[in-house]
């Protein structure tokens, strides 16, 4: 039996479903009534177009777990891949044996053209384990097909447990990445008139936001103009706001964007963004029924009101998920324009694939211009997340020096961290950085100590000049002072 995979999209059903039995509007209301989330996987028989069980029931069960749309779609693809593997072995998913699952693991991690790593397989194996647990709980199977071995491990468990893949950039490497790769300059800082890249100011501002805030990609790339205070606060002022719906696991925390990063964004907003929004305004006007069109924003309360799907809705900005932020628009100078800080040719917020494409293009350009005068490039191209690692390492090293001065003895520095943990919880650099990054546990941040121990003397003494065009060392000092909750004049007493 061949199987087709689809995913729920209530808007598509509402606008395009044409059936004498069920109108699109009624189908969309039914999905809401049944709490079926967009992205929920649907498995249909290729010949009969009837639901394939228990996969459809499992998909509905996953929908009730309140997962993100992208996560549901990803999980759906994993189970479809396993079902295809089983079909090739002449079995269905419920007939899977331990040997089937071990064979699937070998295909994915060893035999296919591009084997996946232990982290990706850990995600897939965890989902398969969850599916068979569901099958047992619902009575489809008497027991799981995989035996549990010593210490709770089974045949599906990844063989290698890796630590964090912490990668970071030096100052020269970051400037090369931002200015040459993303910004289209030549390595000698001159203008490259042959550069044909798109929106270099936007991409440079994005990298400065990522580095200056230490935020994850979905946190900085989905920021709205009111959150940075652009158009409301005095020009070029540091911003502070709460991220929640776009944060990992929905865990709320305060995000601080230093003045230099806001300045970089402000340059893009003044010089480049108007051209993008003006070109896209007619297109957005034609599809306004698919957008969240907001009225004046209450900046004081952080709430936003507008029309979504023909209904007047109101949201806390911090509680707006990425999908909603992507379609949020307001009346601007040229007509409808996105409320998102970063926009692309469509006039709306770039998605993950777009930012990945910008980064890959930057990497190719850096390789083309690499010579004896440019910084050394690593074997693997940089990721946006490496800027978060760089922020963490720079800030952690700076806070340590601020607290205790330079300490070349690595063992002594380890003892100092233990002393912080027991006696200086509030001002412990490790815990400050952990809170700033939104780590669920300080143990995650502790992994960075290996890198500060080995590389602290290689970092620049001054932290200025990383972000924007500032040459003074104020940027990280301001971040540090803000992290401590101190005014700059009070640091000397600590």
Image: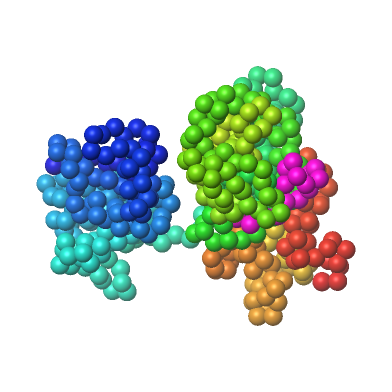
Name the residue nearer the viewer: 8 or 411.
8
- Residue 494: x percent and y percent? 82, 71
Residue at (35% x, 58% y) in the render: 64
Name the residue nearer the viewer: 366 or 259.
259
Q: Is residue 210 magenta?
A: no
Q: How is the image coloured?
A: rainbow
Residue at (54% x, 41% y) in the render: 307
Considering only vertical position in the picture, is 390 above or below 4? Answer: below
Name the residue nearer the viewer: 271 or 422.
271
Residue sitting farthest toward the right: 489
Q: Residue 449 vs residue 483: left or right?
A: left
Q: Which residues are magenta?
A: 229-243
Number of marks in picture: 0
Residue at (26% x, 71% y) in the render: 149
Q: Quadrant of residue 414?
A: bottom right
Q: Residue 312 vs residue 469: left or right?
A: left
Task: Report if residue 122 is visible in the image.
Answer: no
Considering only vertical position in the picture, is 184 above or below 107? Answer: above
Residue sitting farthest toward the top: 194
Name the residue nearer the viewer: 294 or 444.
294
Provide the major secondary structure of the magenta segment.
Answer: loop
Task: Report if residue 157 is visible in the image.
Answer: yes
Q: Is residue 239 magenta?
A: yes
Q: Quadrant of residue 364?
A: top right
- Residue 265: x percent and y percent? 70, 40
Q: Residue 185 vs residue 165: left or right?
A: right
């Amino acid at each position: 039996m061949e199987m087709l995979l689809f995913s729920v999209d209530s808007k598509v059903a509402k606008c395009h479903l044409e059936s004498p039995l069920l109108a699109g509007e009624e189908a969309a209301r039914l999905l809401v009534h049944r709490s079926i989330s967009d992205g929920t996987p649907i498995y249909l028989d290729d010949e009969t177009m009837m639901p394939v069980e228990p996969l459809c029931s499992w998909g509905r069960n996953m929908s009730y777990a309140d997962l993100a749309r992208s996560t549901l779609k990803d999980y759906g693809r994993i189970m479809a891949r396993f079902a295809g593997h089983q079909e090739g072995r002449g079995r269905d998913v419920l007939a899977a044996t331990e040997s089937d699952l071990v064979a699937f693991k070998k295909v994915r991690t060893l035999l296919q053209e591009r084997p996946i790593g232990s982290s990706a397989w850990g995600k897939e194996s965890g989902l398969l384990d969850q599916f068979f647990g569901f099958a047992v709980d619902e009575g489809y199977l008497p027991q799981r097909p995989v035996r549990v071995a010593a210490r709770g491990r089974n045949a599906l468990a990844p063989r290698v447990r890796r630590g964090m893949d912490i990668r970071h950039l030096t100052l020269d490497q970051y400037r090369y990445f931002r200015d040459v790769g993303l910004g289209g300059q030549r390595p000698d800082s001159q203008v490259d008139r042959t550069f044909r890249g798109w929106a270099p100011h936007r991409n440079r501002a994005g990298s400065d936001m990522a580095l200056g805030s230490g935020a994850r990609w979905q946190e900085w790339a989905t920021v709205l103009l009111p959150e940075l205070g652009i158009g409301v606060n005095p020009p070029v002022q540091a911003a502070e706001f709460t991220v929640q719906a776009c944060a990992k696991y929905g865990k709320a925390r305060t995000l601080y964007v230093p003045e230099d990063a806001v300045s970089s964004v402000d340059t893009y907003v003044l010089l480049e963004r108007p051209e993008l929004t003006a070109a896209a305004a007619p297109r957005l006007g034609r599809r306004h029924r698919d957008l969240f069109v907001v009225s004046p924003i209450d900046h004081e309360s952080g709430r936003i009101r507008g029309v979504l799907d023909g209904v007047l809705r109101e949201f806390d900005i911090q509680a707006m998920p990425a999908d909603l932020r992507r379609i949020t628009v307001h009346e601007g100078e040229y007509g409808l324009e996105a409320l998102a800080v970063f926009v692309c040719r469509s006039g709306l917020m770039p998605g993950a694939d777009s930012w990945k494409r910008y980064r890959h293009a930057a990497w190719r350009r850096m390789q083309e211009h690499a010579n004896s005068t440019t910084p050394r490039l690593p074997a693997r191209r940089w990721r946006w997340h490496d800027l978060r690692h760089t922020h963490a390492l720079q800030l952690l090293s700076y806070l340590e020096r601020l607290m205790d001065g330079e300490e070349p003895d690595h063992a002594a520095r380890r003892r100092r961290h233990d002393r912080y943990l027991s006696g200086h919880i509030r001002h412990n650099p490790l815990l400050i950085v952990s809170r700033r990054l939104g780590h669920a546990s300080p143990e995650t941040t502790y992994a960075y100590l290996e890198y500060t121990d080995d590389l602290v003397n290689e970092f620049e003494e001054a932290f200025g000049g990383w972000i924007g065009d500032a040459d003074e060392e104020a940027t990280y000092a301001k971040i540090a002072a803000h992290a401590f909750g101190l005014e700059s004049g009070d640091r000397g007493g600590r």
